[in-house]
Image: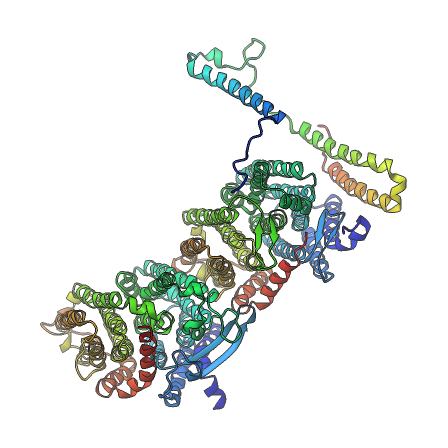
């Protein structure tokens, strides 16, 4: 059933590509005279590009368990590998353009970025609780370093400190939950744990373990009440790193949440395609409450924000809440909706952050007041940011609307109407704060009317991010099919 | 010709979008070119609408029978969730399509004097026109919803960038209000999707015609309480657009702050979408709940009539007065619809068409005086009739049309509504008729204060109405008089469908 | 909701441990709280100052420890764990064959790159 180490190697090629790139970056950094060159940026691009190609070229068919059951290789994992690699690719471009990072050592930044990517690869495919923990730490620790990258700035250091303390606590609680599961079932294999738990009846330690594990995953996706680190970290970290946090670890967190909960706490009912949760606690209500809380807190607090990065941080908390709607009944359609939303969210969110980078390069500021009059100072950037913000709100004809429709559809189909109403109200609230930025850009006069340059690479990247946001709003069939296939291929 | 005929609705909808795309590519600074492209892009749908008028078969009813819709185009759009690009026209949508085409073109001409950011203005306006046309032709609920929402964005910018002193407030208020209603609509949309099946394939569908056939509803959807909740959800969404008291508070702000041409479109077309939605979706899909709520709807309609008129009387801003008069006139539409008689329904639809034209005239005219005097305070004027007699003639005509003078289209519409509703809602119709007195009162009082009486010396040298402005008004004048004297062509257009609609709803009694 | 709250099995030996834990916790926390609640609170500057063998405090209580100790400890952990992995590998060296050799070589190689990095960055300098 499990593939041995030697035979598993050929399924591990994307990870090899990333690892090799990291090592080359270290060597480059040590060998090179000036640590501030952009050679490391290009090398990272090559590495991540290679990883995408290798991940995409996947042997078809049902998944298999590799490395003696530590890691799974299936369509679900491949989906997340490609998704996170794409996010990293865009972030690398963003980092090369960012003035924040320009004066600092480049190679180390990319080392951290790619290490996080490697962690995300492993996190999306881990099927053993030890591997899971390792992968989560591999995602978290370089993230701490990325958050604190701007060494001289107090905000950045504060962000890193908060991230470390919070992350360590959350991981600690999570590993305790894992140890309880190991104690109950005698196995570290997630599938084994699932089987033993399905056989026995629900006990208090098992429920406790499930909750503790949820703490760890909830921290990674910044769900309420595990979200407190998110605004400070997003605000203090360099903007490209913030953009990376908003999509990369979040997507990987969702991957592991889905995989773990499907395997351990659900058993498929072949009749309805709906996963029955083998437990005594009302899981659907619990997840629904978590989802509602997350989106509400995220949206309501975002309304008060004046710093665009902080606002986008709270908005990404809210979006995690929307995505949790698909998780409420652990149905295949719900998971498809989450995967679809992650794809459109990648483009919308990274696009918005990219414009923030372009603007802050010129104005050195990240407040909404720095965006005033952007419509006349940088019309292309302003239009494109409006597209991204309205897509994040979820109005047609943008892709964000389609993503929300899938999530809403799942919740309404399963009859959890109150959650749909909460999400609907939240969408209206979110319009208010996204529109504040749009209003500043178009409806208000700038303090300083000089034009803001948009470098060629940034321009190209913004077009590449805006295009799917527009196109997927009108024709999204291929992405929906990919999401559906990825869920079907989920193995344990 | 064949291609045009078989795709006429899509052409009418997407030619403006194409125009917007072309405008975006015009080099910077060529404002005149952009305006002419926009004029062309909105003129072509008008031409096509003339073809539509002649090609439409007035005997086919449509409403809930797919084969009786005309100019149908049906393509699979997103197969995995059964969304189709399904469009068609019937008697309910025909008058609206013609109205939209006409008013959009006139509004573009009316926007000729906009001086800043022409590119954005024209592109957004054409996008808005696409959204409006698309809403009226869509027969797939998802498609309908997309077009409905597509209208929001351009309106936000058009009001917020080119509007009056409180434009940002008005714009965001409009956007939030309408979005809230739309999201409710989305929930109902999804609830309908999951609980109906396509009779041929057994799969879920967004096809409105399938929703209208009650046997495709599943057991849950047949429960009356569920239907009440869903109907109310849709009703609130549409009521915000109409606008019905108490969801009307966005209207005065939006209308007053919007630039002239946008107010024309807002009042002339967008308000009609609320009642169109009720006729197209709410009434046929939930006929039993419609009958259940007929009286409350009629009461709301009459409240609109009276409240709108009284508020209008209290206004000192001319544009706000016209805005509230719109609220009042839309009350007639709802009254006629709630009566559920063929006469009442025809009256309602006629009022939608007629009021569209009348209110468009009114807003154009208010815009004319605002352009010259830079304020709209009624008491700030006086005796303008002596200085600008042609303008006074036009606005006098418009005011008389608005208060329902016999011989003009407003009278026909209101009378049909009363004739149709009186058998059903005796007292309410009496109250509504009394409301007409208030309507007449505020119109005549405003007319007197602004144009008659002693001349206000400040405006002794006011410019007369010019050729371009007359060009915007003349077609409306002609149509209002024509329909007022000889309404049968328009009534024939909508009659078959509206009778079928009433029969469909009444069938459950 | 079967099984929640869980039924308590009184004959379980760990139950006694739980009771002991509860009493110990209650006593220790209780005594501290009691003394805080019932004891006199008279502020005296000398009483609240830091104890430093009876003399006046020379430095503030929160002394800044040089970060090089931490750096050394981290490097030690990393390479010590590397050695930890080397031991079982060494024991099973023959049966793991060529694959095992290459695998360990890669492992040591990666850590070697890390060592070179630390070396070049000056982490191995004491001052």
Specify the farthest residue to the left: B454
Q: Image quadrant of residue B118?
A: bottom left
The residue located at (55%, 39%) in the rendering is C3
Q: Could you tell me if residue B22 is visible in this image?
A: no
Q: How is the image coloured?
A: rainbow
Q: Could you tell me if residue B360 is visible in this image?
A: yes
Residue A455 to residue A207: above or below: below
Foreground: A216 or A242? A216
Residue B192 picture location, percent across and down: 44, 66
Residue B124 to residue A281: above or below: below
Specify the farthest residue to the front: C11
The residue located at (40%, 89%) in the rendering is B55
Residue B132 picture location, percent across and down: 39, 73
In this rendering, position of residue A439 left or right of residue C112: left
Residue A107 picture location, percent across and down: 68, 47
Foreground: A252 or A286? A286
In this rendering, position of residue A158 left or right of residue B211: right
Residue B132 to residue A68: above or below: below
Residue C105 picture location, percent across and down: 83, 43
Residue A420 to residue B401: above or below: above
Specify the farthest residue to the top: C54
In the rendered view of the protein, which quadrant contains the C terminus of chain B?
Answer: bottom left
Foreground: A371 or A405? A405
């Amino acid at each position: 059933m499990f593939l041995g180490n030697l035979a598993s190697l050929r399924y591990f090629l994307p990870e090899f590509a990333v690892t090799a790139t990291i090592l080359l970056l270290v060597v480059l950094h040590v060998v090179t005279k000036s640590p501030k060159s952009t050679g490391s940026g290009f090398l990272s691009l090559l590495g991540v590009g290679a990883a995408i190609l290798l991940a995409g070229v996947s042997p078809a068919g049902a998944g298999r368990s590799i490395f003696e059951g530590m890691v799974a290789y299936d369509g679900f994992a491949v989906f997340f590998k490609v998704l996170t690699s794409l996010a990293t690719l865009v972030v690398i471009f963003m980092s090369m353009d960012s003035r924040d990072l320009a004066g600092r050592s480049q190679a180390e930044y990319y080392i951290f970025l790619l290490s996080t990517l490697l962690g995300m690869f492993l996190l999306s495919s881990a099927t053993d609780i030890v591997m899971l923990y390792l992968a989560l730490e591999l995602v978290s620790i370089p993230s701490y370093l990325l958050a604190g990258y701007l060494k001289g700035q107090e905000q950045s250091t504060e962000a890193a400190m908060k991230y470390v303390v919070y992350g360590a606590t959350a991981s600690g609680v999570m590993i305790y939950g894992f140890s309880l599961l190991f104690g109950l079932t005698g196995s570290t294999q997630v599938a084994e744990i699932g089987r033993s738990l399905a056989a026995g009846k629900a006990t208090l330690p098992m429920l406790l373990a499930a909750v503790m594990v949820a703490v760890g995953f909830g921290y990674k996706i910044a769900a309420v009440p595990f979200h407190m680190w998110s605004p400070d970290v997003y605000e203090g970290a360099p903007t490209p790193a913030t953009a990376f946090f908003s999509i990369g670890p979040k997507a990987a967190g969702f991957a592991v949440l889905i995989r773990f909960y499907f395997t351990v706490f659900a058993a498929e009912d072949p009749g309805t395609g709906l996963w029955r949760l083998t437990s005594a606690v009302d899981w659907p209500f619990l997840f629904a409450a978590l989802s509602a809380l997350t989106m509400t807190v995220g949206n309501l607090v975002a309304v008060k924000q004046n710093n665009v990065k902080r606002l986008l941080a709270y908005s990404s908390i809210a979006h995690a809440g929307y995505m949790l709607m698909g998780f409420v009944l652990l149905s295949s359609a719900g998971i498809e909706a989450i995967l679809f939303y992650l794809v459109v969210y990648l483009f919308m969110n990274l696009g918005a952050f990219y414009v923030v980078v372009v603007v802050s390069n010129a104005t050195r500021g990240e407040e909404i007041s720095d965006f005033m009059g952007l419509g006349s100072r940088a019309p292309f950037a302003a239009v494109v940011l409006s597209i991204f913000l309205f897509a994040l709100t979820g109005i047609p004809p943008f892709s964000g609307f389609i993503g929300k429709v899938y999530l809403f559809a799942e919740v309404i189909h399963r009859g959890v109407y109150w959650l749909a109403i909460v999400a609907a109200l939240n969408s209206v609230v979110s319009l208010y704060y996204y529109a504040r930025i749009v209003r500043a850009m178009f409806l208000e006069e700038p303090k300083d009317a000089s034009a803001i340059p948009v470098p060629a690479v940034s321009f190209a990247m913004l077009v590449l991010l805006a295009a799917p946001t527009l196109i997927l709003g009108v024709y999204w069939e291929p992405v929906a099919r990919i999401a559906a296939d990825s869920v079907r291929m989920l193995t344990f | 010709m064949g291609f045009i005929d078989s795709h006429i609705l899509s052409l009418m909808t997407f030619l403006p979008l194409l125009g917007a795309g072309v405008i975006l590519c015009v080099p910077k600074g060529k404002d005149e070119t952009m305006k002419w492209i926009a004029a062309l892009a909105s003129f072509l749908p008008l031409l096509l609408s003339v073809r539509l008028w002649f090609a439409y078969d007035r005997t086919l009813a449509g409403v809930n029978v797919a084969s009786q819709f005309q100019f149908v185009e049906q393509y699979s759009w997103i197969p995995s969730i059964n969304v189709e690009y399904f469009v068609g026209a019937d008697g309910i949508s025909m008058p609206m399509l013609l109205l939209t085409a006409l008013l959009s073109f006139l509004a573009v001409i009316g926007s000729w004097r906009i001086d800043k950011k022409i590119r954005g203005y024209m592109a957004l306006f054409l996008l808005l026109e696409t959204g409006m046309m698309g809403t009226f032709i869509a027969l797939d609920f998802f498609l309908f919803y997309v077009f409905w929402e597509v209208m929001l964005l351009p309106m936000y910018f058009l009001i917020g960038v080119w509007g009056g002193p409180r434009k940002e407030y008005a714009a965001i208020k409009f956007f939030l209000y309408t979005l809230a209603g739309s999201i409710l609509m989305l929930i109902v949309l999804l609830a309908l999707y999951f609980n109906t099946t396509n009779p041929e394939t057994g799969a879920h569908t967004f096809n409105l015609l399938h929703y209208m056939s009650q046997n495709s509803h599943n057991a849950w959807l047949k429960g009356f309480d569920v239907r009440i909740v869903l109907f109310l959800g849709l009703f609130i969404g549409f009521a915000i657009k109409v606008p019905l008291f108490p969801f009307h508070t966005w209207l005065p702000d939006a209308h007053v702050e919007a630039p002239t041409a946008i107010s024309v479109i807002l009042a002339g077309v967008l308000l009609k979408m609320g009642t169109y939605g009720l006729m197209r979706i709410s009434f046929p899909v939930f006929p039993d709940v419609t009958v259940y709520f007929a009286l409350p709807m009629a009461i709301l309609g009459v409240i609109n009539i009276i409240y709108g008129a009284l508020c209008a009387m209290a206004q000192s801003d001319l544009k706000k007065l016209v805005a509230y008069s719109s609220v009042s006139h839309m009350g007639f539409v709802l009254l006629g619809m709630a009566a559920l008689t063929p006469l009442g329904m025809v009256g309602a639809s006629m009022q939608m068409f007629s009021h569209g034209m009348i209110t468009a005239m009114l807003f154009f005219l208010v815009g004319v005086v605002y352009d010259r005097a830079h304020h709209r305070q009624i008491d700030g004027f006086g005796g303008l009739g002596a200085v600008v007699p042609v303008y006074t003639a036009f606005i006098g005509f418009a005011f008389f049309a608005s208060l329902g003078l016999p011989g003009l289209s407003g009278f026909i519409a209101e009378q049909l509504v009363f004739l149709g509703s009186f058998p059903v809602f005796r007292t309410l119709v009496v109250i509504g008729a009394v409301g007409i007195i208030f309507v007449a009162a505020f119109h005549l009082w405003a007319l007197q204060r602004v144009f008659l009486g002693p001349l206000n010396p400040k405006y002794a040298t006011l410019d007369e109405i010019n050729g371009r402005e007359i060009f915007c008004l003349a077609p409306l004048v002609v149509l209002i008089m024509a329909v007022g004297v000889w309404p049968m062509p328009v009534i024939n257009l909508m009659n078959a469908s509206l009778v079928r609609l009433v029969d469909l709803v009444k069938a459950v009694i | 909701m079967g099984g929640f709250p869980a039924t308590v099995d009184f004959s379980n030996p760990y139950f006694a441990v739980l009771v002991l834990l509860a009493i110990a916790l209650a006593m220790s926390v209780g005594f501290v709280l009691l003394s805080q609640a019932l004891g006199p609170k008279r502020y005296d500057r000398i009483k609240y100052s830091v104890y430093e063998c009876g003399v006046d405090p020379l430095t503030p209580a929160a002394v800044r420890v040089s970060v090089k100790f931490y750096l050394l400890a981290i490097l030690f952990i990393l390479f010590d764990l590397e050695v930890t992995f080397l031991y079982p590998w060494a024991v099973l060296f023959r049966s793991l064959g060529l694959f095992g050799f290459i695998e360990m070589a890669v492992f040591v190689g990666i850590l070697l790159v890390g060592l070179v990095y630390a070396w070049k960055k000056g982490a191995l300098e004491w001052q």
